[in-house]
Structures are given as C-alpha cells and as structure tokens.
Image: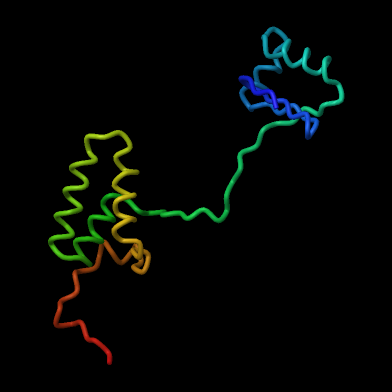
Amino acid sequence: MKKTTGYSINFAENTITLTKAFAQRAKNPATSEFRELAKLHKNFPELTITMRTAVITADKETHGGLTIEWMTDYIKNYKDEVAVAEFEEAKKFYKKMPGYYGKVKAWFLKNYPNYQDVDFADVATSQKPETDDLRIAG
C-alpha cells in the first residue's frame, strides 16, 4: 500500500482511499490535488475511489461526567483524609505537565477502578457516611 498525504492506494482491495480534506480540495480543477487525482485515475482505471471513514469502537469504555470536580467530590465524600491528600498531591504534580486532565483521570482510575458503583448525581449532593451508620451484615 502506497501512503502519501491525502490518499492511499490499496492494490489488494483495488481502492484509492481519499481523506476528506484531499477530496474537498480535489473538487477544484485549479488545485494540485485535482491534477493528482486525475493522474491516479488515468494510471489506475480499475481502482475504485473511496472516502476514508473513521473507525468507531462501540465497546470502548467511557467515563462520561468524570470531571476533576467530580473526582474531588467522590474522594472527599467516600474516602479518608489520606486519600484526599494523595489526590491533591497528584493534581499538583500533574498540573505542570501537558495533558493534565488525562493524567489525573488515569491516576484516579488506577486508584479507584470501582468508582462507577456510585451514581454521578449522588456524589455532589452526598455527605461522607458516618462510621456509626455503617452496619456489617453477618
């Protein structure tokens, strides 16, 4: 498969695949993309011209609603002061780096993989459970 900017040729599938931007520019006869596409079509008339499409993974795990504020509220309401201090330290550490949110989220998911057991709407309004209210069934 030959790979260049804007298109790729796949001889196994008999296709010339165009990116959206390349195809848009190729519509204008005054552009180099138009001339290049015309040359490709002339040289490879048996190949079908197609548009590249994005691959969407439906089974990808998502974390909608997981904001820094939500993570802070979760830790404050459901964990102890040590956990709060660790989270604040992690936020402070990652604040200096690019990709701050992604790094904080990764830290949170590593330390609290079962956070989804709690409803997002409940976290902001809930209070940390008192130890007297906890009852162990047994």
Out of 115 and 69, give the one closest to the viewer. 115
Q: Position of residue 78 (x, y in %)?
A: 22, 67
Compared to residue 100, the image places residue 113 above or below, namely: below
Image coloring type: rainbow
Compared to residue 129, the image places residue 48 above or below, namely: above
Q: Quadrant of residue 23?
A: top right
Q: Position of residue 76 (x, y in %)?
A: 19, 61
Q: Quadrant of residue 46?
A: top right
Q: Residue at x 37, y 64 (%)?
A: 116
13 relative position to 104: left or right: right
Give the farthest residue toward the top. 30
Q: Residue at x 22, y 38 (%)?
A: 95
Q: Residue at x 63, y 20 (%)?
A: 4
Compared to residue 13, the image places residue 67 above or below, namely: below
40 relative position to 2: left or right: right
Give the farthest residue toward the bottom. 138
Give the farthest residue toward the right. 46
87 relative position to 29: left or right: left
26 relative position to 61: left or right: right
Q: Position of residue 67 (x, y in %)?
A: 32, 50
Q: Quadrant of the N terminus?
A: top right
Q: Residue at x 67, y 9 (%)?
A: 32
Q: Position of residue 20 (x, y in %)?
A: 63, 27
* Number of on-image labels: 0
Q: Quadrant of the C terminus?
A: bottom left
